[in-house]
Structure formats: C-alpha cells, structure tokens
Amino acid sequence: MASHKLPLKTLSIGVQEFNYHLDAAFFNDVEATDVREASVDAVVKVDRKDDEIYQLSFEFSGEITIPCDRCLDDMQLPVATTYNLTVKEGEEYDDSDDEVLVIPGHWRELDLTPLMRDTVLLTIPIMHAHPEGECNPQMLDRLEQIRAVNITDDEQLYDPEAGVDNEETTNNSSDDIDPRWAALKKLKDNN
C-alpha cells in the first residue's frame, strides 16, 4: 500500500500539493468497512505558515461501492467533499478539535490515512439505498414474503376493543385480564 505520510519537517514555507488515489484496500486495511470497491482521488494542499503551523486542505472526488441497505446489492455512491485542518506543533497529541490537530513537536511526518479514510466514510449517509425502483426485485420479493404475516380472525394480534395486545393474553382466559387493562377499558366504555 502506498504511503500516505506527509513529511512535515522537510516541507518548505508556502503551498505544496500532494495527490493520492484511494481504493477499496485503503478503506479496509485497518478494519472492515462497507466499502466494497473504491476509486477516489484525494488532493491535499499543504500551506506551511512557519515551523509550527500547517494549513491542510483536502479535496476528494470519485466513487465508492457499498451495499444497499434494502436489497444488499452493490450501489455506487459518488464522493465529492472537502475538509480543512490546521496542524500545530505542541507538547502532546490532541485531536479533540475537528478543525485543529496538535501534534508533538518531535514528529517528523503526519500519517494522513485516518484523516482521509474518516472524511470519505463520513460521506456515507446513515440510510443508503438505491433510488426507488432500482433495488434487486428478487430480494424485495423475498423480503416481502418474510414480512408477510397471515393472521386469521382467531389469531388477531391486537384487539382494539380491549386495547391490548393479544400476544400477552392469548394464553390467559378472559378472567385473567390484568386489572389495569380492565380499569382502562371501563374508562373507555364510560366515555
């Protein structure tokens, strides 16, 4: 795997640009992710202000392949995002601020891998599914079969008159109804 380390101490004052290509192995190297395929280009511009401050600007463009939450088939998700970060030298490592990263002064380089991986992975929406009508129809049919519940009148799960779930009371006779439900039913009947 290509190195994604930024040689901080050897950078000259001013702006320099670094280009990276991120594939599926990049996203799954440390831990397994939902990324099945990837082709993302990352442009990192570094503006070294002085010996202790670096302005980093990340720009990502490309596409990742992830599973659809609905049908589990592959779906392509475009990636187009940016991220800006100030890197400062300090006493100890501190990444508690999303916009400022403090690194120990003795570090000679900065590994960009976690910054780039997290930025792209954060572009994945919580619910990721194909647009309506594009999911695998066989999988949707199978899901519908699993979801379908055949309920006869005798097996009704909810009794609107009693206001209770019959799952809990199916094994009980009508004399064994929880007194709280009976009290609620009485209130309802009086109104």
Image: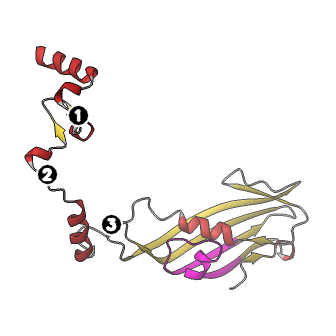
Give the residue type that dot 3 points to: Arg
Residue 89 place in picture, x, y as percent: 85, 59
Q: Which mark is residue 151?
A: 2
Left or right side of 158 for 19: right
Residue in view at x 21 percent, y 21 percent: 182
Q: Residue furthest bottom?
A: 1
Q: Residue furthest right?
A: 106
Of the two numbered discs 2 and 1 on the same chain, state the one appearing first in sequence. 2
The CA span between labels 2 and 1 is 19 Å
Residue in view at x 29 percent, y 68 percent: 131
Q: Which residue is more in the foreground, 74 or 9?
A: 74
Q: Secondary structure at mark 3?
A: loop
Residue position for label 1 = 172
- Which mark lies nearer to you, 2 or 1? 1
Find out whether residue 105 is within the magenta segment. Answer: no
Residue position for label 3 = 70
Q: Which mark is residue 76?
A: none
Q: Which residues are magenta?
A: 17-45
Q: Which residue is more in the foreground, 15 or 32?
A: 32
* Displayed quadrant of residue 138: bottom left
Give the residue type that dot 2 points to: Ile
Q: Does the image show residue 191? A: no
- Which mark lies nearer to you, 1 or 3? 1
- Up-down relation of residue 150 to residue 60 (above or below): above
Q: Residue furthest top?
A: 190
Residue in view at x 11 percent, y 18 percent: 189
